[in-house]
Image: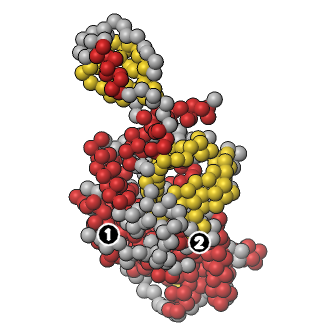
Amino acid sequence: MNYQTNWIAFKTIIIKEYIRITRIWIQTLIPPVITMALYFVIFGRLVGSRIGEMGGFDYIQFIVPGLVMMSVITNSYNNVVSSFYSAKFQRNIEEILTAPVHPAIIVLGFTMGGVLRGLSVGFLVTLTALFFTPLPVHNVFVLILVVFLTSFLFSLGGFYNALFARNFDEVTIIPTFVLTPLTYLGGVFYSIQMLPEFWQMVSKINPILYMVNAFRYGFLGVSDIDIVFALSLITIFSIAFFILNVRLMIRGYGIRN
Amino acid sequence: MIINKDNNSDKEINSRLPALEISNLTKTYNNGFQALKSIDLKVEQGDFFALLGPNGAGKSTTIGIISSLVNKTDGTVKIFGHDIDTNLEIAKSHLGIVPQEFNFGIFEKLTSILMNQAGYYGIPRKEARERANYYLNALGLYDKKDNQAGKLSGGMKRRLMIARALIHQPKLLILDEPTAGVDIEHRRSMWDFLVGINKAGTTIILTTHYLEEAETLCRNIAIIDKGNIVENTSIKKLLDRMDSETFILDLKDPITEIDSMDGMKFQLIDSKSIEVSIARSRTINELFSYLNSKNIIILSLRNKSNRLEELFLNLVEKTLK
């Protein structure tokens, strides 16, 4: 493995992704900001003012970390699945596949492209939230680590989806039927302490619950679950997905005949 | 002018090694179709090599395997001695591919496409920009450098793919029907460009359906049909094998009939043009002498079809039988 070649190739993939994200900023950066602003207005201000406090904070402050995380998750995932699948569809993925780039670099490059968009959107949504409510920062280290690892994990998930996708329908199935319900049921709008014990246990099967709560801990210092356990879980899943994607790339699954 | 720097990890290539060496290459697709049936092929360094065959013969599958876009079933492929099974990254670094289908991002600018491709080969951004400008200029695309690739004409898209394949200055360039849909003027200038880079040392493998192109450009040839190499020789030797050649003659005055003779078979096309098939044992001088003796005046003479085309059809027809 030629390290210099792969390092330049890695930077090239990220530059290409950056150009793509900024070229179509109306599709990539603006819609989540508008959607989340509506959430802040409706659920935070209008409905939230009648709900009162949750976890010791105003309702809007309680839901902002979850909504930021929701936009990070969906945008990280969607960026990689659409970018990689489009490259497959237009066959310009062959530009990289015929070049001496290690499959791990291809996975890492596209994944970091997803992280770039996820974090950019997360930053913009957080800025938007500040127009509606002040946000305390309880632990900046946990905050950055959780948002980065979560974005990384869901970017890897998007890559996995794109490898398997044979048409554009298969690009949208998982975000629509899996990610969205898991996110809404992942404690974005409520504390699982409010649920009966049985549903609390069911909720704990949902991996997004751990990410939302760990991220909320970074901001507010409150969480329904153990932070170390949540961070360990995200890290283990990230490593597993990375290895899986690299192995599939080496085998040429979904990209080579 | 771009200085030809070697980006490859093995700085010196043994000049005796073939540019491409394929042994027992077999490909069976999941549906059971056997696209390649244990083919062997060797292309020497510096060659301009034609890989011909009818549609579905196995040309694109062969190129797909060489460029690692298609998994082979069996056999070995070596590029400048580097086996793609054990030394894939080095093998890839020597190879440039111009595919049959357009395969670039249609919304990307030409400069971005070339600079990104250079980046995948480890070429730093500054040098990548210089190279991109050079190849865009060389292929007559510089004025379009900031245009979206999808908005180019068909011929320009082909030239863009050639520029992209050359950006890392590969030692082996494979072109899969590079002039399909390109007008005559641009085809000729593309030929001149390819001859130039071949003279500068790049080994070229070309697939084409324009047999005139193969005859004009290439020194050696392999004909593949139904997954088998049915011929592999030099173009000169192949053409020497022709036992007859067919010409069309335009006459000054109309005639109603003409008798064939030994080694010259005539056929009246219309009153002022005839087709003649001349055996290798006879000469054009003898043909003219014969026509003179019949008081037939010739205005012009041309080949009925490209010579290689006649041979190609003969070889492919043989395998059909």
Which part of the image, by quadrant, shows the C terminus of chain A? bottom right
In the rendered view, would you say B149 is above or below A201?
A: above
* Residue to which mark 2 is pinned: B87
Q: Is residue B129 left or right of residue A65?
A: left
SS of the residue at dot 1? helix
Task: Evaluate whether label 1 is on the same chain as label 2.
Answer: yes
In the rendered view, would you say B144 is above or below A5?
A: above
Q: Residue at x 30, y 52 (%)?
A: B192
Under mark 2, the amino acid is Asn
Front one among A102 and B300: B300
- How far from the left and from the top, in percent, is residue A239? 64, 79
Q: Is residue B85 left or right of residue B192?
A: right
Which of marks 2 and 1 precedes in the sequence?
Answer: 2
Q: Is residue B19 left or right of residue B190?
A: right
Badge 1 crowding class, 10 Å Cα cut-off, few under 14, some 14 to 19, many 20 or more, is many
* Residue to which mark 1 is pinned: B131
- How far from the left and from the top, in percent, is residue A175? 57, 63
Label 2 marks a residue whose chain is B
SS of the residue at dot 2? loop
Q: Residue at x 31, y 22 (%)?
A: B288
How many angstroms separate mark 1 from mark 2 (CA)?
27 Å
- How far from the left and from the top, in percent, is residue A107? 55, 72
Under mark 1, the amino acid is Arg
Q: Residue at x 45, y 57 (%)?
A: B47
Seen from this angle, which residue lies furthest top?
B256
- How far from the left and from the top, in percent, is residue A66? 54, 77
Badge 2 crowding class, 10 Å Cα cut-off, few under 14, some 14 to 19, many 20 or more, is some
Quadrant of the rendered structure where residue B113 is?
Answer: bottom left
Label 1 marks a residue whose chain is B
Quadrant of the rendered structure where residue A221 is?
Answer: bottom right
